[in-house]
Structures are given as structure tokens and as C-alpha cells.
Image (cartoon, rainbow, N blue to C red):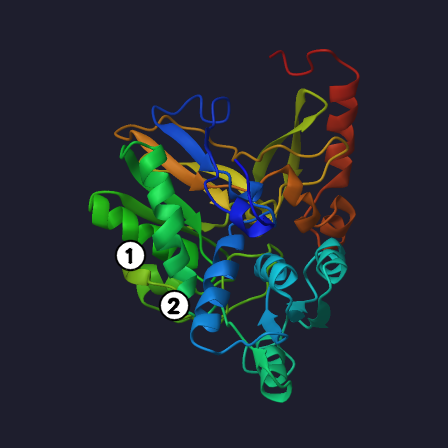
């Protein structure tokens, strides 16, 4: 494969089967590895489509400035486009995002403005409001607004959905995806439903976000702050098609055990609150009728040798499913995860338990008898 520029390398990421993590499931579980995109996430796709449409309609002219509110991934996708096509960049981002994200965006030439997380979307200090204000004040600028841009879900309808359908040979039965702007799950869901109306579209929403309560009970609850980056929302973007959903799972286990690798040996760590199983981004929740791979698009937990995966504590056999495609992050996304020290400060990580388990793993060739 030969590309004329980095943008041509975006997309056509492989589906990778989860063998060990889903070994007790009768379903074949695959991860759509969009972390292999050049910018490290699925959002590379919408960076191209939103800017292509803006150029086509004369909304963005040569030498202009791209302004966007982002949790980091969309900023990366837009930064790649800006670098190739010669645009300036200004991104607003919340203060809960990792320093590595901010530094990386700056390294690509962007000006990054950090805004407070714990404010309402309408607050003039929010990263939404600041981005809108800047787009009005800076001449020859364009505000893609991924939350209200139809080219966000369209990118996934045109590329991600067809890729998943073709690579699964049309055998996919369930698609599971974290919900943020809703672009991925809405675009992929629309395409898959057109190919086979029986495909189940399952969203994953962290405690504190609005989606779960609205879909399940029709209630518009007040959003609460949560640690996980990239999924969940505190308002309802127009890019989210809630009607496409067959189910939504809320990540709210009080105690969860995860698996990560220290060297090549499995090790357990314990986490304790409602934000727990969403914090680390990649995970599986198994129920009697569903298998869910959390796709926070953000990050797996950082470890001494880098984390590989995160699995929920209770594992049950799944019946009546053939293939499940899920969105997953990868080890490249470790910069999106809070450090263990930061998680401990937030009360989300028990370092004493982790220290004991780390000692057990490193002192034995087969610490768990596996």
C-alpha cells in the first residue's frame, strides 16, 4: 500500500478477534482497531469528512484556521488534515484530559486552550462556548462542531460501517460502541441496519452521562462529572441518533476486577466506584444476552509494561450470538488514561492492593496457577 499523504492511511483498520478475553463466550468477539489510524483513534475519519465538506461549501479557505472543542481525538484528526493542507489550528479542551494529549496537539502546531470541566455546556467558560466565541472572533476561521455536524455520522456510514460489514462477511449480529457525540454508533448503526435490520446496536454509557436514563426511562437527568474521557455527554448532540439503539448499558459496577499484563503474566487490580469500569476504556461486560466491549476510545490503563486489556469481573456464557464487533482502543492510547497516582487522588484506585498483586506476580512464575 502506497499513500500520497498521511490522510490516505486513515481507515481500513482490521477486525481482531479476542481469543483469551472472550474464551468463555459462545460468540466470536472482534475489535475494530481504529487506534491503528495515524492519529490513534476513530476520529481521524471525521476530521477528513468535516473539512472536505467545509472546503466544498467555501466555509474554509486556504490559510484559514480550524477551531474545535475536543476531548483530544477529534483534535488529532483535524490536526492531521490541517498539517497536510496548511491550516492553522485552535482547540479548546477540558482540564480532565491528560497532559500528554495537550502536549501532542501543541507539537502538531495547534494552540490549545484548557477550559474547566465542571461547568454547564452553556457556561461561557465551557470548552464548547469558548470554541464558539473564538470562531466568531477569528477571521477566516471554521468551527466544524463535531456535535452538530452531519458529516460526523456520515463518515462512519460511508467508511466504518461498510468495513465492519465486509470484514465480518455480513455475519455480524451485535455492534457495541461507546457513545459520545454519537457519530460512530449512529453512522455505523445506520449502515448495519440497512444491510440487516436484525443487527443489534448497543451503546455503552458511563454513570454521570445523560444517555442511559433518557433511553431507558425517558428522563433528562442532570449530568454529573466523571473521569473517563471521550464517551458520555452532558447534553444531547444532534449527531446522536438515539432511535438507532437497541439497548444501552450503563457502566456502574461498584467493584470490578481488571486484567492487564505485567510482562507476560496476568495480574489483577481492584477498583471501587461507579466510575471504575469506565475509567480504563477497554473492557468487557458479559450478561446473559449481551457481550459488551467498552470503547471509550480512550486508553487502557498505564502499567509498568503498558496495559493490554481490561475485563469485567463476572464472566458468563453467552448464547444465541454469532459475531460481535466492538470498538477498541489500544496500547498507543495509554496517554489518554490517567496515571495510577491520579486515579488514587480521585479515590478511583487502591494502590495497596495493586502493590501486593504486583509483588505476587513478579515473584512467581505462575502466580495464579494458570
Please tell me whether residue 115 is drawn above or below residue 211 in the rendered image.
Answer: below
Q: Nearer the viewer, residue 206 or 5?
A: 5
Q: Is residue 232 above or below residue 254?
A: below
Tell me the CA gap for discs 1 and 2: 15 Å
Residue 143's disc is none
Tag 2's secondary structure? loop
Residue 114 placement, left or right of 80: right
**Residue 222: percent from the left, percent from the top?**
48, 72
- What residue sits 72% from the left and 69% below the top? 112
| Position of residue 95 in the picture relative to residue 186 (left or right) | right
Q: If the image is split into quadrants, where does the C terminus sit?
A: top right
Among numbered discs 1 and 2, the one appearing first in the sequence:
2
State whether residue 254 appears in this view.
Answer: no
Q: Which residue is mark 2?
A: 150
Density class for disc 1 (Cα within 10 Å; few <14, some 14-19, many ≥20) is some
Give the image location of residue 178, x and y in percent: 46, 51
What residue lies at 38% left-to-right and 68% top-to-bottom? 150
Q: Tell which of 231 and 87 is nearer to you.
A: 87
Residue at which label 1 appears: 244
Percent coordinates x, y for residue 194 in the rendering: 22, 50
User: Which residue is found at the position 76% from the left and 40% from the top?
Assistant: 351
Position of residue 163 in the picture relative to residue 139 (left or right): left
Measured along the vertical axis of the image, is residue 367 above or below residue 286?
A: above
Label 2 crowding class (10 Å Cα cut-off): few <14, some 14-19, many 20+? some
The image quarter containing residue 355 is top right
Amino acid at each position: 500500500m502506497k499513500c500520497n499523504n498521511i490522510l490516505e492511511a486513515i481507515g481500513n483498520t482490521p477486525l481482531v478477534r479476542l481469543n483469551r478475553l472472550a474464551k468463555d463466550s459462545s460468540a466470536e468477539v472482534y475489535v475494530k482497531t481504529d487506534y491503528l489510524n495515524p492519529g490513534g483513534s476513530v476520529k481521524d475519519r471525521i476530521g477528513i469528512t468535516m473539512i472536505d465538506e467545509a472546503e466544498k461549501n467555501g466555509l474554509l479557505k486556504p490559510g484559514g484556521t480550524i477551531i474545535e472543542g475536543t476531548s483530544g481525538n477529534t483534535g488529532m484528526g483535524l490536526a492531521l488534515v490541517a498539517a497536510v493542507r496548511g491550516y492553522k489550528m485552535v482547540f479548546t479542551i477540558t482540564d480532565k484530559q491528560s497532559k500528554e494529549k495537550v502536549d501532542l496537539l501543541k507539537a502538531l502546531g495547534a494552540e490549545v486552550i484548557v477550559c474547566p470541566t465542571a461547568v454547564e455546556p452553556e457556561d461561557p467558560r465551557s470548552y464548547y462556548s469558548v470554541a464558539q466565541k473564538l470562531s466568531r472572533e477569528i477571521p477566516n476561521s471554521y468551527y466544524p462542531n463535531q456535535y452538530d455536524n452531519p458529516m460526523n455520522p456520515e463518515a462512519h456510514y460511508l467508511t466504518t460501517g461498510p468495513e465492519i460489514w465486509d470484514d465480518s462477511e455480513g455475519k455480524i449480529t451485535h455492534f457495541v460502541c461507546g457513545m459520545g457525540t454519537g457519530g460512530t454508533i449512529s453512522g455505523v448503526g445506520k449502515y448495519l441496519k440497512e444491510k440487516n435490520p436484525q443487527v443489534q446496536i448497543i451503546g455503552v454509557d458511563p454513570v454521570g452521562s445523560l444517555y442511559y436514563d433518557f433511553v431507558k426511562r425517558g428522563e433528562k437527568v442532570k449530568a454529573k462529572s466523571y473521569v473517563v474521557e471521550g464517551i458520555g455527554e452532558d447534553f444531547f448532540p444532534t449527531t446522536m441518533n438515539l432511535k438507532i439503539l437497541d439497548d444501552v448499558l450503563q457502566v456502574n459496577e461498584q467493584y470490578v476486577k481488571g486484567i492487564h499484563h505485567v510482562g507476560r503474566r496476568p495480574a489483577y487490580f481492584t477498583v471501587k466506584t461507579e466510575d471504575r469500569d469506565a475509567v480504563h476504556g477497554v473492557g468487557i461486560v458479559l450478561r446473559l444476552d449481551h457481550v459488551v466491549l467498552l470503547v471509550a476510545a480512550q486508553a487502557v490503563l498505564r502499567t509498568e509494561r503498558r496495559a493490554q486489556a481490561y475485563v469485567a469481573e463476572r464472566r458468563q456464557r453467552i448464547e444465541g450470538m454469532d459475531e460481535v464487533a466492538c470498538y477498541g482502543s489500544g496500547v498507543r492510547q495509554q496517554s489518554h488514561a490517567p496515571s495510577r497516582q491520579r486515579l488514587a487522588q480521585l479515590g478511583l484506585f487502591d494502590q495497596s492492593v495493586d502493590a501486593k498483586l504486583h509483588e505476587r506476580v513478579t515473584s512467581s512464575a505462575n502466580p495464579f496457577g494458570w
